Amino acid sequence: MDNRSIGIFDSGLGGLTTVKRLKELLPGENMIFLVDTGSVPYGGRSTQTLIKYAREDIDFFNKFNVKAVIVACNTVSAAALNYVINDYDMPIIGVIDAAVNRAVSETKNKKIGVIGTVATINSGIYIKKIQAIIPDAQVFTCACPLLVPLVENGRIKKGDIVIETVLKEYLSTFKGTGIDTLILACTHYPLLKDIIEDIMGPDVFLVDSGGVTAEYVFDWMEKNDLFSQSAQGNIDYFVTDDTESFRNTASLFLGSDITENVHQASLSGKNEA
């Protein structure tokens, strides 16, 4: 048993979709969620900047003695995590491997699509990891730089002509490819799942990278006897920008309002908010 908290971070509010799934699976766990809204989005940043941000985000959890840090950000997981993970003693879990493993297990025709930020797609990590398991897999990718800011601004509902038009344009990349599996390689994208399903059709299985990572974390904690003894855990939210704006938008991701435990955070190397 281990009563220490789980640390989770993302550049934006998309990581809340992972927090929500973790809370469903692990209701007794205390969690600390760091959201670097002061620097969102990470998706168009250089590799060196992403490495710097990753270190600042992970360093934040040192003072809490967490039992693990979950990188609920595909961009950092794809482009920066390999450069920093060996610098820390604590377990650090990204979102790439669980998504790849689920996609590989679901595909029937070995044709897999991936949508994500520019940095995630340009890293090529999904292609590399999928083909390491299935060498003859065909992997089709599309960078979607407009999706994170649209989701952060609440443009997530069916019938919203803006988000539907943008998604149709991006997803047209996969027309004629025959993919039967699509990885949502950004933790913001599950909020668009209904629209994506309508566009892609019922024959394409969608993989929620953050959700399947939460399931992986549950299995990992069970195997290592890391569950908390508590029946009900708490979540503390730390925000590097405006806390009130975070409260107002977070309900879109969590499905409920946040009324307490929201704190201002300052990361090493960044100015005070």
Image: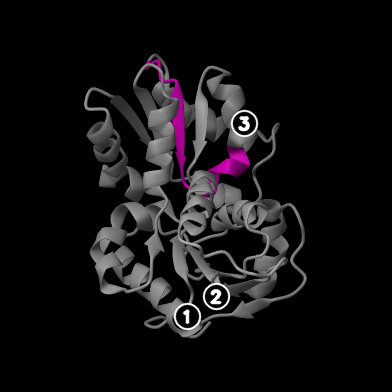
Q: Quadrant of the N terminus?
A: bottom right
Instruction: Please tell me whether residue 221 belongs to the stretch shown in magenta.
Output: no
- Looking at the rendered structure, the secondary structure element under dot 1 is loop
Residue 205 percent across, percent down from the top left: 51, 26
Q: What residue sits right under mark 2 in the picture? A: 4
Amino acid bearing label 2: Arg
Which quarter of the picture shows residue 116? top left
- Res. 195 mark: 3
Residue 157 percent across, percent down from the top left: 69, 38
Residue 113 percent across, percent down from the top left: 39, 29
Q: CA distance from mark 2 to mark 1?
A: 7 Å
Q: Which residues are magenta?
A: 177-192
Which mark is first along the chain, 3 or 1?
A: 1
Q: Are marks 2 and 1 in contact (CB under 8 Å)?
A: yes
Q: Could you tell me which residue is drawn at 62 percent across and 31 percent down?
A: 195
Residue 249 percent across, percent down from the top left: 68, 59
Other residues around mark 3 within 10 Å, as few (<14) / some (14–19) / many (≥20):
many
Q: Nearer the viewer, mark 1 or mark 3?
A: 1
Which mark is first along the chain, 1 or 2?
A: 2
Instruction: Please tell me whether residue 186 belongs to the stretch shown in magenta.
Output: yes
Q: What residue sits right under mark 1 in the picture? A: 65
Which mark is first along the chain, 3 or 2?
A: 2
Q: Could you tell me which residue is drawn at 27 percent across and 47 percent down?
A: 123
Relative to 83, does residue 185 appear above or below in the rendering? Answer: above
Other residues around mark 1 within 10 Å, as few (<14) / some (14–19) / many (≥20):
few
- Looking at the rendered structure, the secondary structure element under dot 2 is loop
Amino acid bearing label 1: Asn
Q: Could one spot residue 207 in this view of the protein?
A: yes
